[in-house]
Image (cartoon, rainbow, N blue to C red):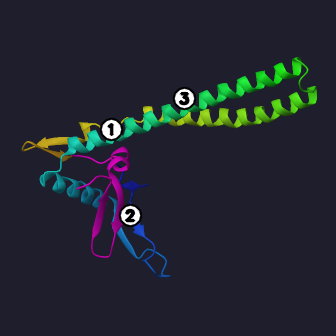
């Protein structure tokens, strides 16, 4: 990750204390320092028998569950779309058989068409989410080194942070890292 912008070091700044009206940069930490803190914290956890492979497997399993949920949603929405298509055909057949007037048929068809438009948008959004999820692979072992038969984090990148770090709390005297997994 880049640690400078136009030749100047980057800082992360906490702009307000909890329950305070004080604004401005009240606590700051150098970007490079913050990155090293996260790396050191993760490596410390690893030394405490943190099973990185298990964490990655949990992340992959969660991803598979989410993909499955989206695929099931697409399937259900497609079934509903078929039902709407059948409903329009039934209205048409009723009109053709003289059971309903042309205006009733057109009104009902238009109602169903509005529902179908919304449904088509939902299906399109679900396919988009599925594609994004399938395109974004989980982080592999390439960000780790093996040192003394233990895995150590060697570098940070945005994808790694998004996958493993829930939040980083910068306080006046310490930096706390909250993980997305149980330690």
Describe the element under mark 3 as helix, strand or loop.
helix
Describe the element under mark 2 as helix, strand or loop.
strand
Please name whichever residue, 115 or 83, is drawn nearer the observer in this view of the structure.
Answer: 83
Residue 139 lies, in percent from the top left, at 32, 39
Say if the magenta span includes residue 159: yes
Describe the element under mark 1 as helix, strand or loop.
helix
**In the rendered structure, which disc, 3 or 1, sits on the residue that comes first in sequence?**
1
Left or right: residue 93 compared with residue 56: right
Q: What stretch is highlighted in magenta?
A: 154-183
Name the front one of labels 2 and 1.
Answer: 1
Marks 2,3: beta carbons within 8 A = no
Q: Which labelled disc corresponds to residue 75?
A: 3
Name the front one of labels 3 and 1.
Answer: 3
| Cα–Cα span, label 2 and label 3 | 47 Å
Q: In this view, does 28 lie above or below 157?
A: below
Left or right: residue 149 compared with residue 107: left
Left or right: residue 7 compared with residue 80: left
């Amino acid at each position: 990750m880049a640690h400078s912008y136009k030749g100047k070091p980057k800082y992360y700044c906490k702009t307000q204390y909890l329950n305070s009206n004080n604004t401005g940069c009240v606590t700051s930490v150098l970007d490079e320092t913050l990155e090293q803190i996260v790396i050191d914290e993760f490596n410390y956890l690893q030394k405490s028998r943190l099973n990185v492979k298990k964490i990655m497997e949990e992340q992959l399993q969660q991803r598979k569950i989410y993909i499955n949920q989206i695929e099931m949603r697409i399937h259900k929405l497609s079934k509903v779309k078929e039902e709407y298509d059948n409903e329009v055909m039934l209205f048409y057949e009723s009109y053709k058989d003289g059971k309903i007037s042309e205006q009733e048929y057109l009104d009902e068809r238009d109602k169903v068409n509005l529902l179908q438009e919304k449904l088509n948008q939902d299906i399109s959004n679900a396919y988009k989410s599925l594609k994004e999820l399938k395109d974004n692979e989980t982080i592999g072992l390439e960000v780790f080194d093996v040192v003394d038969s233990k895995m150590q984090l060697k570098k940070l990148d945005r994808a790694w942070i998004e996958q493993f770090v829930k939040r980083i709390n910068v306080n006046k005297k310490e930096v706390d890292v909250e993980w997305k997994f149980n330690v």
